[in-house]
Image: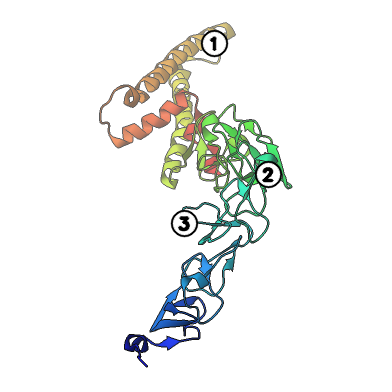
Amino acid sequence: MIVDLALISVGLSCSLSACPVGQYGQCEAFGSCYSCEVGVCHGCPPGTYSPSTGSVSELACIPCTAGTFSNVSGVSYCATCPPGHYTTTADGTGAASHAIACQECPAGKYQPKESSYFCDDCEALAPYTSVEGSTNCSICLEEYFMEDGSCHECPKNGVCPRNTKTATINVESGYWRVDLYSHDILECISNRDACIGGSGSLEAGYCQDNVGGPYCLICEKGYFRERKNTSCKECGSDEDLMFQLCVVAGLPIFLVMMVIAFWHFHKHDYCWKDSLTARITQMNKSYAILKAKFKINVVFSQIVSDFPAQFAFEYPELFTRVSNELSSIFSLAFIAVLPQECVW
C-alpha cells in the first residue's frame, strides 16, 4: 500500500477540525474526510457567526439575521440591535443580513422595537420629531416648543429652535418675560438696550449685567441710573460719595452766605424810621442787583463746568471732579451727583 506522506504531515481526519466556536479550520476535503492544517483556525468574518466547534470552512459561518449584527470576527452569536437603533453595512445602509454595525436612528427618525434594520420617519407626526437614537417622536420641530407633552407654536418675539421647551424659549433682543415659564414676551419700550433677551438661563436673566426687575428697569445694588433710558453705572467709592455730598451741600450754603453778606453789607444803609415805600424801593433794587449777581455766578459755573466736555485739554484732577459735579447740578441732573441708590 502506498502512503501519501504529505497528507500525513498535515494531519488526516475523517472528523471535524479542532477549531472552537466562531472559527473554522484551513481544511481540504478528501472524499468524506478532511485534511486540516494543524493549529490553524480562522475567525468567521464580521456579519457572520458560528455556534459550532470543528468547522472546516468559511461556509460554516452563518450570516447575522435581520436586526442582529457582529462587528468583529470570530463570534459565536450575533448581538441584538436595541430599540432606537438599526443594523447596517459598512457604509451605513440598513442591512437585513450580514450586518456589521448597529447605529442610532438619525434625527427625525425613530424605532421603538429591537432587532430592526430600519427606522421609521417622524414626518407623518409633525410638528413632533426626534433626536438621534430615539424610540419615539417626542420633541418639537423648529418654531414650536414643548409643554405638558404637546407642541405649541412659538410665541411672538420668541425664538424656538428644534427641541425647545417652555423654559428654553429664546427671547429676542429688546424684549423680556416674567420667568422661564411665561408665554408672554413683552417689549422693553423705555429701556430696550438693557433687555438683551436670550434663554434667560444666566443669573441676569433677560437683562444686561447689573440690571434686573420688570422690563430690566432696576439697577442692582451698588449701581445707579443717571437718567431714564441710560445704562446702570457703578456707584463710586466712599470718598467719591463724600466729595459729592460736599458739593451738593456746599453750593446752597455758598448761596445763603452770599445773601447774608449782601444784606449785612447794606443793612446799615437803612434806618428803621425810613418810610415803607423807600424800603420797598431799596429792596427791589437790592433784589435786582442780587439776581444779576446770582445769574452771573450760575452762568459762570455752567460755562466753566462744561470746559472738559467742550475742550480736549488735560485739566487738574480737582478741577475735573468739581466741574463734573457742578455740571450735573446746573443741568438739574441731581441724581447723577448724589444717586439715592448709592446713598442708602
The residue that appears at 56% across and 37% down in the rendered structure is 197
Q: Earlier in the sequence, mark 2 or mark 3?
A: 3
Q: Judge the density around disc 3: few (<14), some (14-19), many (≥20) Cα neighbours within 10 Å.
A: few
The label on residue 279 is 1
Disc 3, SS: loop
Q: State the separation of the CA atoms marked 1 and 2.
A: 84 Å
Residue 329 in picture, x, y percent from top left: 46, 27
Q: In the rendered image of this protein, does residue 110 appear above or below residue 285? A: below
Name the amino acid type tagged 1.
Arg
Residue 59 in picture, x, y percent from top left: 50, 70
Name the amino acid type tagged 2.
Met
Disc 1, SS: helix
Q: In the rendered image of this protein, does residue 83 appear above or below residue 29? A: above
**Badge nearest the viewer, 1 or 3:** 3
**Badge nearest the viewer, 1 or 2:** 2
Asked whether the viewer can see residue 309, the reply is yes
Q: Earlier in the sequence, mark 1 or mark 2?
A: 2
Q: State the separation of the CA atoms marked 1 and 3.
A: 112 Å
Between 143 and 280, the residue placed more toward the observer is 143
> Which residue was labeled with disc 2?
146
The residue that appears at 56% across and 60% down in the rendered structure is 97
> Which residue was labeled with disc 3?
90
Q: Judge the density around disc 1: few (<14), some (14-19), many (≥20) Cα neighbours within 10 Å.
A: some
Name the amino acid type tagged 3.
Ala
Asked whether the viewer can see residue 26, the reply is no
Between 55 and 108, the residue placed more toward the observer is 55
Residue closest to the far left: 314
